[in-house]
Amino acid sequence: MKVGNGMTLGNFIQIKDPGSVTGNIDNYIQTSCNGLYLHEYGHTIQSRHYGLAYLFNIGIPSIISAAGNGEHCQKWFERQASRYAKYYFGPSIWTPTIDLYHPTNR
């Protein structure tokens, strides 16, 4: 896994983050890797919603997409995960900067 990438399966989130936690953990989670932790949490919400179908409808297509040509963040399942996270954490946490890296509406 490349630095700055993540993967979620059920409630397990794996992120390759080069940083180390300094200061407030909430600030670190929000800013590290441009909100990747928050986006990946959106995938845990998807997993709860889809159940076992998550693996086939989102998990495997996401892995294939991430290995592709750079359009990964534009896939419906990636935008949906970001929307779920944005709704869950709220606009005070999900900033416009995070939305640049993990779009919700494009």
Image: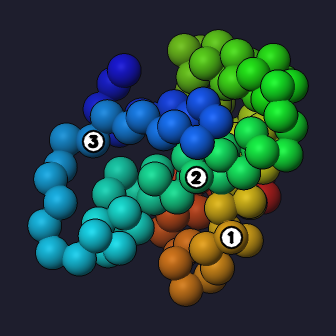
Q: What kind of residue is marked 3?
A: Asp
- Please give the name of the residue rendered at 83% of the width and 34% of the height, measured from the top-left corner: 51
Which quadrant would residue 89 be assigned to in this image? Answer: bottom right
Mark 3 / mark 2, whichever is N-terminal: 3
Q: Which residue is mark 3?
A: 17
Q: Which mark is residue 11?
A: none
Total marks drawn?
Answer: 3
Q: Is 72 rendered above or below residue 83? A: above
Q: Which residue is mark 2?
A: 41
Q: What kind of residue is marked 2?
A: Tyr
Q: Which residue is mark 1?
A: 88
Label 2–label 1 contact, CB within 8 A: yes
Q: Is 61 rendered above or below residue 95? A: above
Q: Quadrant of the N terminus?
A: top left
- Please give the name of the residue rendered at 35% of the width and 51% of the height, measured from the top-left corner: 33
Distance between the alpha carbons at the discs numbered 3 and 2: 15 Å
